[in-house]
Image (cartoon, rainbow, N blue to C red):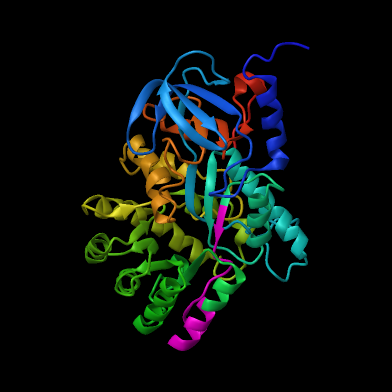
């Protein structure tokens, strides 16, 4: 048998099995105490610090040490850049394109098993793209995928899910509180709330202050975070007043709303381009479903400009906590890093700031800031490397060459897997 040029045979076997074995649940300590040393030319820690020629020592699924390179390495990434596993705080895991070439709908004939299989495929694509944790503001089909990943039955990113959502039709405050409690009983990790229409319908506020107070107040009482879809400035302000955890989108927010979010410590999750471009580049997947029509697509085109104007507004607000969420829908899973590229190229962010947003800041927003999002001793061994340095070439965010989640290798560099590497 020939010598493996990149890793020990033992690690190769572990990595090969990762596609079916998955990793331990968050917070669990692997019984395997095998030490793995991962070496990289540059290590970015997720908190804005980059160091040259470092080793990350992994033991029992966690980072045991970060030290200058010395001795033997089990995984030598050469001059590649190593960073914490990426986090997307807004995906739709269960959205997929059916065999008819259209967005899956409940009445299109696909059974629950088909939906779960497609959600599993979406999860695996995101893991291969370097996203080791995702938050899905989706439906009930998320639960079996989340739980199978946590049990190690399938490979995928760590998944947090709302298992559904609520809006103004949930009724008066008491009814809304009851809905929140039911989500909690079903095993939801967070509560997803629609406080405004979509941007295709003008983004106007739909929930009253009393309704939002009830939804976010009950979520907090149940120990859950509340994530609010809010395009209108009035909806974002109402969410802040209600003590909601996070405001998504905010395409139409004004300076006052952003200032309120910064003062209250509300997490803000705008998008850059992935979701709009996915819709506009693949109109026929969506056309004819709900408000996916010529008028809706025209509104999306206008939103491209509005999103760019929003960037100038939120960059001007000191203390605003901007996290990373793409709103990845059908067809976009695995391309989640496109918004990292966009935030550097179009928004004028530094690659380091964009990466911090997609790692340690997003981890904090999920309540997991002491577990993931950093390359530091004690943290989960979630690691991703890029072919190229994103600080020089933002496109490197899309060239993921190595993925480790919880100490398990899920993707190996082209130099090991072969020269014809296909990136997600």
* Magenta stretch holds residue 177: yes
Q: Nearer the viewer, residue 417 or 313?
A: 417
Q: Please provide percent x and percent y for residue 390.
A: 41, 30
Q: Residue at x 37, y 48 (%)?
A: 361
Q: Nearer the viewer, residue 212 or 12?
A: 12
| Residue 132 forms part of the magenta stretch | no
Q: Position of residue 407 (x, y in %)?
A: 58, 36
- Pick the front one: 294 or 172: 172
| Residue at image point 53% right, 31% down | 58
Quarter-of-image position of residue 305: bottom left
Q: Position of residue 96 (x, y in %)?
A: 65, 56
| Image quarter of the N terminus | top right
In the displayed structure, 247 sits above or below 213; it is above
Report the quarter where the C terminus lies. Answer: top right
Q: Is residue 211 visible?
A: yes
Magenta stretch in the rendered image: 159-180
Q: Which residue is at a point 41% across and 23% down the rendered structure image?
A: 67
Horizontal side, residue 366 vs residue 110: left or right: left
Residue 96 visible at all:
no
């Amino acid at each position: 048998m020939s010598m493996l040029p990149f890793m020990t045979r033992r690690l190769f076997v572990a990595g090969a099995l990762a596609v079916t074995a998955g990793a331990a649940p968050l917070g669990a300590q692997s019984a395997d105490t095998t030490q793995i040393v991962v070496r990289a030319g540059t290590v970015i820690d997720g908190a804005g610090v980059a160091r040259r020629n470092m080793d990350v020592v992994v033991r029992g699924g966690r980072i045991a040490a970060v030290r200058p390179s010395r001795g033997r390495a089990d995984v030598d990434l050469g001059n590649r850049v190593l960073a914490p596993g990426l986090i997307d705080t807004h995906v739709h895991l269960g959205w997929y394109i059916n065999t008819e070439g259209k967005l899956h709908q409940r009445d299109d004939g696909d059974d629950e098993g088909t939906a779960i299989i497609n959600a599993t495929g979406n999860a695996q694509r995101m893991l291969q793209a370097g996203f080791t944790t995702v938050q899905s503001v989706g439906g009930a089909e998320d639960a079996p995928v989340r739980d199978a990943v946590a049990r190690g039955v399938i490979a995928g990113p760590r998944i947090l899910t709302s298992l559904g959502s609520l809006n103004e039709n949930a009724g008066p405050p008491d009814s809304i509180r009851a809905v929140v409690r039911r989500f909690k009983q079903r095993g939801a990790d967070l509560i997803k709330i629609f406080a405004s229409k979509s941007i295709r319908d003008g983004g106007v506020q739909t929930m009253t202050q009393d309704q939002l107070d009830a939804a976010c107040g009950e979520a907090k009482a149940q120990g859950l975070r509340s994530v609010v879809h809010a395009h209108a400035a009035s909806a974002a302000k109402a969410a802040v007043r209600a003590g909601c955890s996070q405001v998504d989108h905010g395409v139409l927010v004004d300076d006052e709303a952003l200032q309120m979010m910064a003062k209250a410590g509300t997490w803000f999750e705008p998008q850059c381009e992935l979701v709009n471009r996915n819709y506009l580049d693949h109109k026929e997947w969506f056309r004819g479903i709900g408000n996916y029509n010529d008028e809706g697509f025209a509104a999306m085109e206008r939103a491209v400009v509005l999103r760019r104007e929003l960037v100038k507004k939120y960059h001007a607000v000191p203390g605003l906590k901007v996290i990373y969420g793409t709103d990845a829908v059908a067809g976009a899973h695995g391309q989640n890093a496109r918004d990292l590229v966009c935030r550097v190229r179009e928004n004028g962010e530094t690659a380091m700031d964009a990466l911090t947003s997609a790692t340690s800041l997003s981890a904090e927003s999920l309540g997991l800031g002491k577990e993931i999002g950093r390359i530091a001793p004690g943290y989960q061994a979630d690691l991703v490397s890029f072919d190229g340095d994103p600080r020089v070439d933002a496109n490197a965010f899309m060239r993921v060459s190595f993925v480790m989640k919880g100490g398990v290798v899920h993707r190996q560099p082209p130099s090991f897997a072969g020269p014809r590497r296909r990136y997600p």
